[in-house]
C-alpha cells in the first residue's frame, strides 16, 4: 500500500485551525477585550488554516 504523507503546509494548517478552535472557546473574554476584532481574528485564523490545508495538493 502507498501511504500518502502530508507536507508541512498541511500540518501548519491544522495547527492554525486548532488555534481558531481554541479562540472560539474563549470568544466571550476575547470579545470583551478586543470587541469586533475578536471575530476578525477568528475569521483570519480560519481562513489561513484552510488556505494552508487546501494548498497541500499531495
Image (cartoon, grey):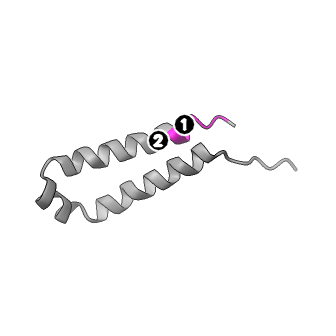
Q: 10 Å neighbourhood of mark 1: few (<14), some, or many (≥20)? A: few
Quarter location, residue 44: top left
Whether residue 15 sits left or right of residue 9 in the image: it is: left
Residue 8 at x, y = what percent?
62, 47
Whether residue 7 sits left or right of residue 12 in the image: it is: right
Q: Residue at x 45, y 45 (%)?
A: 49
Looking at the image, residue 15 lies above or below residue 48 = below
Residue denoted by label 2:
50
Residue denoted by label 1:
54
Residue 5 at x, y = what percent?
73, 48
Front one among 57 and 37: 37
Answer whether residue 55 is magenta in the image. Answer: yes
Q: Residue at x 36, y 62 (%)?
A: 22
Q: Residue at x 14, y 47 (%)?
A: 36
| Mark 2 and mark 1 residues within 8 Å of each other at the beta carbon | yes
Element type at mark 2: helix
Q: Which residues are magenta?
A: 52-57
Q: Which mark is residue 21?
A: none
Amino acid at each position: 500500500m502507498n501511504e500518502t504523507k502530508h507536507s508541512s503546509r498541511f500540518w501548519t494548517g491544522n495547527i492554525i485551525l486548532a488555534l481558531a478552535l481554541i479562540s472560539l472557546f474563549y470568544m466571550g473574554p476575547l470579545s470583551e477585550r478586543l470587541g469586533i476584532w475578536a471575530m476578525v481574528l477568528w475569521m483570519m485564523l480560519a481562513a489561513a488554516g484552510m488556505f494552508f490545508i487546501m494548498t497541500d495538493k499531495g
